[in-house]
Image: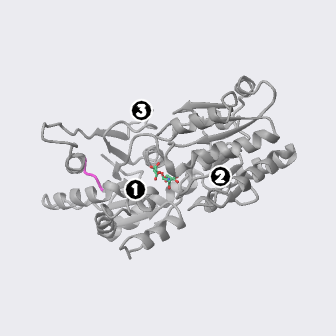
Amino acid sequence: MNIGVVCYPTYGGSGVIATELGKRLASEGHNIHFITYSRPIRLDLFSENIFYHEVRTPDYPLFETRPYESALASTMVDVARYHKIDLFHVHYALPHASVAYLAKQILHTYGINVPIIVTLHGTDITVVGRDSSFEPVVSFAINQSDGVTAVSEFLKEATYQSFNVSRDIEVIPNFVDTQRFHRHQKDHFRKMLTGNGEKILIHTSNFRKVKRVEDVIGIFAKVAEKIPSKLIMVGDGPSRKSAEDLVRELKLKDSVYFLGGQDAVEEIYSVGDLFLLPSESESFGLAALEAMACGVPVIASEAGGLPEVINQGKSGYCCTVGDVDCMAANALYILSTPEIWQTFSQNARMQAEKFAIEQISPLYERYYEKILANAGKKVGTAASSTS
Ligand code: GMT
């Protein structure tokens, strides 16, 4: 199959999922054409079946903001016409679902039908997409797409609740590469961070309001009062400055490291004793899954799809959003004895294996085939695919 993939290329779970899925499908013989405004962050290695088309949005003195959507639709049309795209898979509804609809209508004028599949990821539904400035467009585009998937049952239901949508939505959960994400031997790194055998707590995110980074620090402060610990903060974003200020205010500066954006997160998770994700809203929680694959138990809020990922009481705990006391108490319980931690760590890995990429990517392939069949299109399988 020749598949056009549209996603956000910067740090963020939806871009990671889009890129890792594309890489996996390319390794199985499909031709994957990424169409984005910069190279997707995890598109690091050359593969003969992967192509990258940069969307250029020319500037003009009249533009206060550049019309990216028009440039993206035009690039999608161009790539579809000249690379014989069988279907477009667009990740994150806003604005990709409506842009894909536009591209599809334009392609019809050339006598070309390219079905559109939209994957809903999170705040495109739960936060920004449902704002009245966008809702009618997002509802329309979801209804008009040939296929729609959501990354959790929670997100599927949230879509029905917040949008004027009644069509079928297929739940295909996110996945993890369990070969890459496993507990690496990183004793020297651990020693570097914790000269006195402290526990290591980790948080990774894009430091937005929805992540409740102040709760991460609150949980850590309570844990550190009882058990000597360090906190590693990975990622960057708007809440980082206030988080650093809070750490200074609480006089925790020597125990909290802000590492900024990192690529080899599996190496950091490999020295982790707990992963903290107390988000306000989280459709899935890919970072938690990746940490679990490295044997790190998770302390999280019970927001959104997190309870579908974390096996409560086995691989971690979920508490009510904002209940820092509950999260700290559960963290202390897991860290209280090496035996309890070991059991949670093993369970975390086992739970993550249920979401291994080799289990989940065939679900997407089957869904592609179904949508293509519904559209009356017959295309080759991975093995017979040609560009
Ligand atoms: O919605 C966002 O915050 C952005 C989005 C992304 O592009 O990174 O994250 C969402 O999609 C991820 C991948 O499917 C999920 O793992 C995250 O839980 C989800 N974020 C939220 O729901 C806040």
**Image mark for residue 186:** none
Examine the rendered structure and indicate whether residue 202 appears above or below residue 285. Answer: above
Element type where label 1 sits in the image: loop
Question: Is residue 88 shown to the viewer in this render?
Answer: no
Pick whichever, 199 or 87, lies toward us: 199
Q: Estimate the spatial distance between the alpha carbons at disc 2 and disc 3, rounded to whole Å.
A: 28 Å
How many marks do you count on the picture?
Answer: 3
Residue 266: x percent and y percent? 62, 37
Q: What residue sits right under mark 2 in the picture? A: 352
Marked residue nearer the N-terminal end (1 or 2): 2
Q: What residue sits right under mark 1 in the picture? A: 381
Residue 318: x percent and y percent? 68, 58
**Image mark for residue 46:** 3
Marked residue nearer the N-terminal end (2 or 3): 3
Q: Estimate the spatial distance between the alpha carbons at disc 3 and disc 1, rounded to whole Å.
A: 22 Å
Left or right placement of residue 76 versus residue 89 in this view:
left
Marked residue nearer the N-terminal end (3 or 1): 3
Please give the range of residues in magenta. Answer: 82-86
